[in-house]
Image: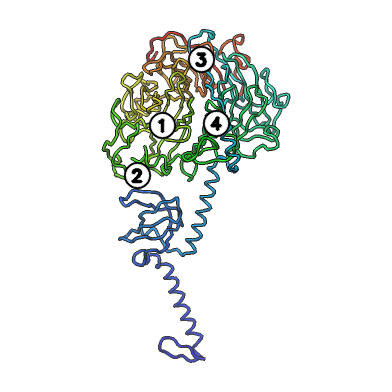
Amino acid sequence: MRYRTGCFHQTEANETGSLFRYGKRCLLAILLAVVFAPALLAQADWKRGQYASFTGEADILSPTDVVIRKSDPGEVVRIRMLHGDFAEVGSSLEDRPGGKVRLADLKPATAQDHEAWTMAGAQRKADEAKEAAPLNSEASPEEEVALETKESGMPTSATPARPAFTSRENSSPVWGWLPAGVKIHSLARIEGGDIVLAGECPPPVGWPRVRGWQGAAPSTSTEGTPLPFLLRLSANGREVKDGVVFAPEELGRIKLVREAPGGALWVLTEQVGANLGGKDAPKAARCLVRMAPNLQSIERVIPLSVEVGDFAVDAANRPATLRFPSGRSGGGYLARFFSEGHFERTFPAAPDGPTRRMKLDFSSPTLADGPFAIWARKAETLPDTATPLGPWGSERNAGQSIEWTNVKSGKNPIRGADLKPEALAIDREGNLYVSGTIPFHMGFPDFDPFLLKFSPDGKLLWTNTFLNGLLSEPDQKTQALDIDPTNGDVLVCYWQHGNNVKTLLLAPDGWLTKFTGTNGNIKIPWIGRVDAATGRLKNSTYIHSRMPNSPNKRWPDINSASVADMEVAGDGKVVVAGGTTISFPTTVNAFLPVVHEFGGHPMLAVLKPDLTAPHYSTYLSAGKGDVDHLATLAGGAVLCVGTHSLEGPPPPVTTAESLPEYLSPTPPAEGKECGFAAILPIPADEAEWSFHTD
């Protein structure tokens, strides 16, 4: 037997050695090919139509070098065009844009790799669609028609009336401790003016007239698990009228509670047990539950497959939910439940009937060509929307030529394609208002505010960003959103964080429009009153303390405050509560006008409807604490619920004889903080205010 190698003939005796040397050369050639082939291909051997995969995370650019998105390691693309060190590529997934990438970031991929990646992408899209859908079951056309007919006949009614600060029924202030371990997560007013507190408490429950869902209130729970509860107070906030405590297997943690027409109550809970929802009780991780006014029966349960950050209920008892963004699945979702049907459509192409859903990000058809096109599509002119980019009172900026960005690099400042919805409200006509922020990245994180108005069927009516310029320097975040019951105006509060740069529009006659300096770290609320018909800002003001001697040398001009809750009273006054540090502006008739210890202290401010001055402003304690929730009460008072430190200056606790029966004059013996509640009468007359320093 003979083997031919090149042009030489070898005898059988030399076959073994020659074969060994030949194998070594082949192995070396294979190793060299594995090491250098990708580099060679990247430099010279790429072809149009070839499949490639990313070696790691890389930038995918537009023709003008704007970063469209980041690649995933191993993501497969197909080359459309080659030019220099770059290739134009098309995404293998429908929902991911192509663009320009560096050849050095690519390596060859096979058609099999491409097929596997496409299948994985299809599965990813299916998973995200399932996660995003509030409801997943289907309904027949006959069921849809029947439900839409039923829905169209539902009566509408006004939301529960809110009291004004006129009556003097509540004449003296109240300040007391909640029992140890009690946490209040939400509160709402129901028809008739009663206040419902939602939270959790350790067993056993000691409040009077509080029962369990099935008889006596539970005296124990598994491993000390807190028990969810609903506590109904009288309209003046001083009496316990009713309450129900749930075992952990009956109802999960109640996160939010909302008022509804007819005295019913909607709650957002983490789960519903079979003995509450019946044999068809959903196994979903979260549920919307409508309870009867007497808190003794469940009227409706809606399972949710997503994490809901906020929800609201309209005058026809129809809830809407706002899903906050999470992970890589894009922006949040706005969903509205028009009927009892567990099926859904997208908003734009459907009549009143089943559930509606809309994705809130730059890829949404409703938004991409509208108010955010200036950022999402590098628009040269500003669309005719209520998005002022000039001084207070400037005209609508229809067709106004603008600069693409004020970022020094000139690149697109958008970080990702997400909007960050943060709060939801519904007016009496069923219009939906969504407040949130737009994420940017300009070498450091930055978030600019937006407020959107949608019609009941999901049509975008207007938007406003409240910016005095294209982009702002401080960060913003929504703190509160509410509707004025007297005229339908929208009140929105943003928390501004950053240096003293005036970027949000400020009414010249607003209450506080100036800071104390130009070198300070500010964490202050901005409150705006917005015309519901046009989206134009009517009034605005800041709320902040003023520190004459900052303890931080880097930031000598600190201004600080934070709003946790806001409500517009029945006479249009704007009530805000939260925490602030020393030298907060208070009125001379304040419950507590001055504190001396640096740090966060609970505060309450009642502003005139036009936001030009406080009607009443006060601290609630000289000790450390914060107000988390508030409600206006019958009798001209405000109920504030929050947390307070058990260390430092004592709070102004009311004597035991004057305290409501759900509060205590003494704090718990252990722990660092405890819940409290305060009822503060609001004087009928206005008073002078000042930044107290002594």
Q: Is residue 493 visible?
A: yes
Counting from the top left corner in percent of width and height, residue 361 is at 43, 41
Q: Nearer the viewer, residue 204 or 384?
A: 384
Secondary structure type for disc 1: strand
Extreme-right residue of the structure: 215
Disc 2 from disc 4: Cα separation: 39 Å
| Whole-number angstrom distance, CA of label 1 to CA of label 3 | 27 Å
Q: Position of residue 306 (x, y in %)?
A: 55, 40
Q: Earlier in the sequence, mark 2 or mark 1?
A: 2
Q: Which mark is nearer the camera, 2 or 4?
A: 4
Nearer-N-terminus badge (2/4): 4
Q: Which mark is residue 312?
A: none
Q: Which residue is mark 2?
A: 377
Determine contact: label 4, label 1, CB under 8 Å.
no
Quarter-wise, where is residue 530 in the image?
top left
**Residues under labels 4 and 1: Cα distance?**
29 Å
Which residue was labeled with disc 3? 163
Image quadrant containing the C terminus: top left
Which quadrant holds residue 466?
top left
- Above or below residue 37? Residue 589 is above
Horizontal arrangement in the rendering, residue 224 relative to residue 528 (left or right) = right
Going by the image, does 51 lie left or right of 668? left
Q: Kindly identify which numbered label has been placed on residue 451.
A: 1
Instruction: Look at the picture and state if 26 lies above or below 449.
Output: below
The residue labelled by disc 4 is 152
| Any part of residue 185 in sight | no
Q: Horizontally, is 470 left or right of 186 in the view? A: left
